[in-house]
Image: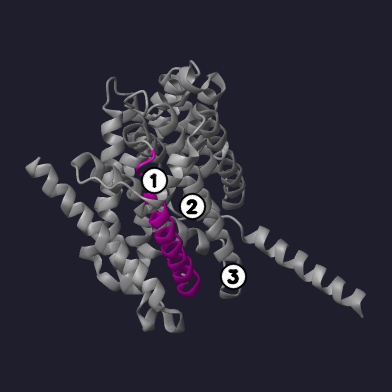
């Protein structure tokens, strides 16, 4: 009897593991792609300017990210519709138009920072941006246009795992763990324009608006159902942990080495170059290679997510499993975003750091608009049935909206009067 029970338990364990591995993807990919070139730059600037003092922001960001991603997955599983589709149905075409124009502008900026990351990381390794950027653009275009969802997802998961190289880079900087612990337990909050701007930027890049659309659409594209929910939640948890762990070590790497030296970062590659004399050549190369992987990864996902949710919002066919003839608007928009982003990067003297930070701040400002739309939809019985939000989800979601609006207002007031 005991032997049969053991075999049954083992069989159930392997079956559950097989189901989880089949489902693994949307949460991990969405979380990992969040650590893109814009995110790496923002986290690097946070560490270089403020040392360990902004690490505390990652804790509330993790909680909010986990709650929001769960809502996205639940909405996708229950309704079978993407977030953009639900916003159009529940808010009307006019509101949808203005929301998505803002998101499209922000995402062109986001995509531009990805190619800035490709250019910067390859320049550290001695390759000109006039070679690396067009080659990277062609590679990601072929992956999406000529590939399919299963192939793309496998490539994305490999890219996700490569981002953990930042742990190695941070440890080589010999961080002060006592100071890190103190900064988390007793955060030092400043009321200055620069500090508030970086806080909004960190939140905006950790919980980017586009992520909500990509997460929900990838759940639908993968065909996940209600019975898969518990496995989806594990996938989301792993993705959110990956986001915050990588962000933590990027901040630590720059705070441990550049902050004491007063080194100013103008773009992500500056962090890699600055690490060379401070933490060794290997730390510099690892940081640059991590930046390249993150940039290629996100340069594929971001324009893809943008094209997907814009087409979905306005009723066009979308999805990488569809042929060009079946979804021409989707592929034309995707290709256009790639080309515009590459052209901006190839302009000599383009203000890349300004574009990067302002884009992340714009993400932080647009996020409350997306969250409000989400919160209203996920609490509608006629849309979600018995799967509407519970008190905890609503508390976290509405608190995030209020705090982000307050931070944005504070930033504008400080910008005017300082």
Q: Earlier in the sequence, mark 3 or mark 1?
A: 1
Q: Camera-side residue: 168 or 71?
A: 168
Mark 3 residue element: helix
Residue 239 falls inside the magenta stretch: no
Taking the magenta stretch, the answer to whether it contains residue 53 is: yes
Residue at coordinates 41% horizontally, 25% vertically from top-left? 269
Residue drawn at x 55%, y 42% is 146
As measured in the structure, the alpha-carbon distance from the residue carrying label 3 to the one carrying label 1 is 34 Å
287 over 4 or under it: above or below: above
The segment highlighted magenta reads 52-79
Give the Cα separation between the discs numbered 2 and 1.
28 Å
State the residue in front, 78 or 358.
358
Q: Nearer the viewer, mark 3 or mark 1?
A: 1
Q: Residue at x 57, y 65 (%)?
A: 232
In the figure, is residue 318 to the left or right of 224? Answer: left
> Label 1 neighbourhood size at 10 Å, few (<14), some (14-19), many (20+)?
some
Q: Which residue position is annotated with label 2?
A: 30
Res. 61 visible in picture: yes
Residue under the image location 40 percent in, 74 percent down:
392
Residue beneath disc 3: 230
Q: Position of residue 192 (x, y in %)?
A: 19, 42
User: Mark 2 or mark 1, which is nearer to you?
Assistant: 1
Do tag 3 and tag 2 residues touch (Cβ < 8 Å)? no
Residue 244, percent across and down? 47, 49
């Amino acid at each position: 009897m005991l032997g049969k029970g053991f075999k049954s338990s083992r069989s159930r364990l392997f079956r559950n593991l097989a189901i989880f591995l089949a489902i693994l993807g949307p949460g991990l990919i969405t979380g990992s792609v969040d650590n893109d070139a814009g995110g790496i730059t923002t986290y690097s600037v946070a560490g270089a300017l403020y040392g360990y003092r902004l690490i505390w922001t990652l804790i509330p960001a993790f909680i909010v990210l986990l709650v929001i991603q769960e809502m996205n997955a639940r909405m996708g599983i229950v309704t079978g519709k993407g977030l953009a589709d639900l916003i159009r149905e529940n808010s009307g075409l006019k509101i949808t138009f203005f929301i998505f124009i803002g998101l499209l502008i922000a995402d062109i900026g986001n995509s531009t920072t990805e190619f800035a990351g490709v250019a910067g990381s390859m320049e550290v390794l001695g390759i000109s941006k006039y070679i690396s950027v067009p080659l990277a653009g062609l590679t990601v275009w072929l992956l999406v246009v000529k590939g399919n969802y299963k192939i793309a997802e496998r490539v994305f998961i490999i890219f996700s795992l490569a981002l953990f190289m930042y742990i190695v880079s941070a440890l080589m900087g010999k961080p002060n763990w006592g100071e890190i612990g103190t900064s988390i337990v007793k955060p030092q909050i400043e009321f200055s324009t620069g500090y508030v701007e970086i806080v909004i930027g960190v939140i905006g890049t950790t919980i980017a608006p586009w992520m909500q659309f990509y997460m929900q659409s990838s759940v639908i594209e993968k065909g996940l159902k209600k019975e898969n929910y518990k496995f989806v939640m594990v996938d989301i948890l792993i993705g959110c942990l990956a986001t915050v762990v990588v962000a933590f070590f990027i901040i630590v790497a720059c705070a441990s080495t550049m902050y004491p030296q007063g080194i100013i970062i103008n773009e992500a590659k500056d962090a890699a170059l600055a690490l060379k004399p401070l933490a060794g050549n290997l730390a510099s190369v690892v940081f640059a290679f991590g930046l390249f992987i993150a940039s290629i990864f996100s340069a594929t996902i971001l324009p893809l997510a943008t094209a997907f949710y814009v087409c979905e919002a306005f009723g066009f066919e979308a999805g990488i499993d569809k042929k060009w003839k079946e979804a021409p608007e989707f592929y034309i928009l995707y290709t256009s975003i790639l080309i515009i982003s590459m052209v901006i990067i190839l302009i000599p003297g383009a203000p890349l750091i300004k574009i990067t930070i302002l884009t992340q701040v714009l993400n932080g400002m647009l996020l409350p608009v997306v969250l409000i739309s989400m919160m209203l939809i996920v609490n509608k019985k006629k849309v979600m049935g018995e799967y509407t939000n519970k008190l905890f989800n609503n508390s976290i979601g509405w608190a995030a909206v209020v705090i982000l609006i307050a931070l944005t207002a504070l930033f504008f007031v400080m910008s005017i009067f300082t």
